[in-house]
Image: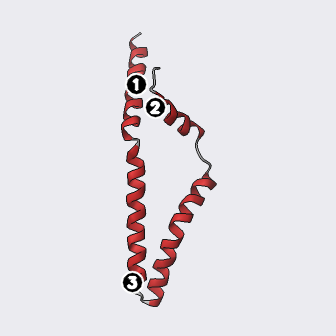
Amino acid sequence: MNFSSEEAALLRQLAHGFGLGRRFGFYAATLLPVVAFGVYGFLKRDYVASSVALLGAIGHIAWRISAETQHLQLYRSIAQKVLAEAERRETA
């Protein structure tokens, strides 16, 4: 298959992968402060802390959506090449 350098780099990254512990650690480090603010705000009836927690959660979600869509065009391009190769082999 004839992948571009960006496509090949993305495939290498996906093939290497990350361990479950590393992903859990990453998400825990970004979400625990938000959850702590939310729990504190709920227990103390502190609406400012609850608002900060909500904004933090919304920010985290927006950031992850942005990161996921960053490589969307590369994923599409790779899928099209793989599909074309599979169809070519079926007809051969």
Count of picture labels = 3
Q: CA distance from mark 2 to mark 1?
A: 10 Å
* Disc 2 element: helix
- Identify residue type, mark 1: Lys
Q: Given the current orientation, which residue lies at the most extreme top position?
A: 92
Q: Residue at x 52, y 77 (%)?
A: 36
What is the crowding at mark 2: few (fewer than 14 residues within 10 Å), some, or many (at least 20)? some
Residue 42 image offset from top left, x and y in percent: 44, 84
**Sequence-wise, which precedes: disc 2 or disc 1?**
2
Q: What is the CA distance from the residue labelled 2 to the residue labelled 3?
A: 45 Å
How far apart are labels 3 and 1 at the CA level? Answer: 51 Å
What residue appears at the point 45 percent right and 20 percent down from the top-left corner? 2
Residue drawn at the location 38% of the way across and 19% of the way down: 87
What amino acid type should be assigned to the residue bearing mark 2? Glu
Instruction: Say what secondary structure mark 1 lies in.
Output: helix
Q: Quadrant of residue 74?
A: top left
Identify the mark nearer the N-term, 2 or 3. Answer: 2
Residue at the disc numbered 1: 81
Q: Position of residue 56 (x, y in %)?
A: 42, 69
Place of residue 78 in the rendered image (x, y in percent of width and height, measured from the top left): 42, 30
Q: Mark 2 and mark 1 in contact? Answer it, CB < 8 Å.
A: yes
Residue that numbered label 2 is attached to: 7
Answer above or below: position of 17 versus 3: below
Q: Position of residue 34 (x, y in %)?
A: 48, 72
Coloration mode:
secondary structure
Q: In which quadrant of the rendered image does the C terminus lie?
A: top left
Residue type pointed to by label 3: Val
> Which of the numbered marks, if any, corresponds to residue 48?
3
- Tell me the mark number nearer the camera, choosing from 2 and 1: 2
